[in-house]
Image: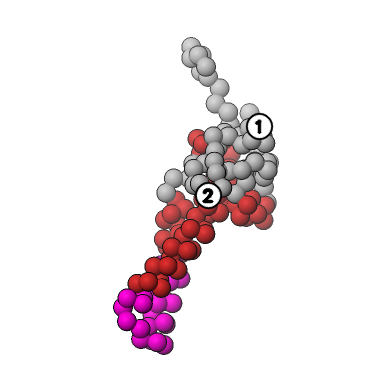
C-alpha cells in the first residue's frame, strides 16, 4: 500500500481554484463546467473521485464566512446611508448569492484536496476481500 506524496499547500489552493484532481492536478474534478457534482474518476490519472465527495462541509464554511463578512458590512451600510429595508434585502441578497455561486466550487475542491492530503488511506483502492467477487 503506497501513500501519495503530500502536496504543498500552495499547490492545493491552485488546484482548488482551478477545480482540478487532487492527485495529478490535471483532470477536472466536476462533471461539468458549472456543476457541483464530483466526477466519477479523474480523466488523467484514474483516481476515483465520486466516493470522496465533501458533503455539506463547504456549504457550512461558506455560511460562516458570509455571516462574518456581510453582517458587519450591512451594519456599516445602515449607519452611513439609512436605506429602506427593501434595499438591504435586495443588496445583501444579491451579494450573498454572487459570493456563494463564485466560491462554492473552489471551496468544495479545496476540502476534497485537504481530504486527499490529510487522509491518504481513505483514497487507496479497495481490494475485494476473500470470498467476494468484483
Q: Which mark is residue 34?
A: 2
Which residue is under mark 1?
Answer: 2
At x 47% / y 53%, what residue is drawn?
Answer: 58
**Residue 27 point in image, percent of width and height:** 65, 41
Q: Residue at x 50, y 14 (%)?
A: 133
Magenta residues?
Answer: 66-88
* Between 14 and 100, the one nearer to me in the picture: 100
How was the colour assigned to the protein in this rendering?
secondary structure
- Image location of residue 69, percent across then percent down: 46, 71
Q: Is residue 27 above or below residue 10?
A: above
16 magenta-colored: no
Asked if disc 1 and disc 2 are in contact, CB closer than 8 Å, the reply is no
Residue 31 lies, in percent from the top left, at: 54, 41
Nearer to me, 83 or 108 = 83
16 lies left or right of 63: right
In the drawing, does residue 8 fall left or right of residue 79? right
Q: Residue furthest top?
A: 131
Q: Residue at x 44, y 51 (%)?
A: 57
- Mark 2 is surrounded, within 10 Å at the Cα level, by few (under 14), some (14 to 19) or many (20 or more) other residues, namely few
Dot 1 falls on a residue whose secondary structure is loop
Left/right placement of residue 78 relative to residue 50 reads: left
Relative to residue 89, is residue 51 depicted above or below?
Answer: above
Q: Is residue 75 magenta?
A: yes
Quarter assignment of residue 90: bottom left
Q: Quadrant of the N terminus?
A: top right
Q: Tag 2's secondary structure?
A: loop
79 or 22, which lies in front?
A: 79
Observer-side mark, 1 or 2, equals 2
Residue 7 to residue 126: above or below: below
Q: Is residue 102 visible?
A: yes
- Return the x and y of residue 17 as percentages of the image width and height: 61, 55
Amino acid at each position: 500500500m503506497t501513500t501519495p506524496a503530500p502536496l504543498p499547500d500552495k499547490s492545493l489552493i491552485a488546484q482548488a481554484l482551478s477545480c482540478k484532481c487532487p492527485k495529478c492536478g490535471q483532470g477536472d474534478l466536476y462533471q461539468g463546467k458549472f456543476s457541483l457534482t464530483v466526477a466519477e474518476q479523474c480523466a488523467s490519472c484514474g483516481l476515483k473521485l465520486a466516493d470522496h465527495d465533501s458533503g455539506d462541509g463547504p456549504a457550512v464554511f461558506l455560511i460562516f464566512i458570509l455571516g462574518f463578512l456581510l453582517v458587519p458590512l450591512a451594519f456599516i451600510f445602515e449607519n452611513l446611508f439609512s436605506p429602506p429595508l427593501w434595499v438591504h434585502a435586495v443588496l445583501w441578497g444579491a451579494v450573498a448569492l454572487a459570493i456563494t455561486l463564485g466560491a462554492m466550487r473552489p471551496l468544495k475542491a479545496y476540502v476534497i484536496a485537504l481530504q486527499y492530503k490529510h487522509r491518504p488511506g481513505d483514497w487507496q483502492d479497495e481490494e475485494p476481500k476473500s470470498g467476494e467477487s468484483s
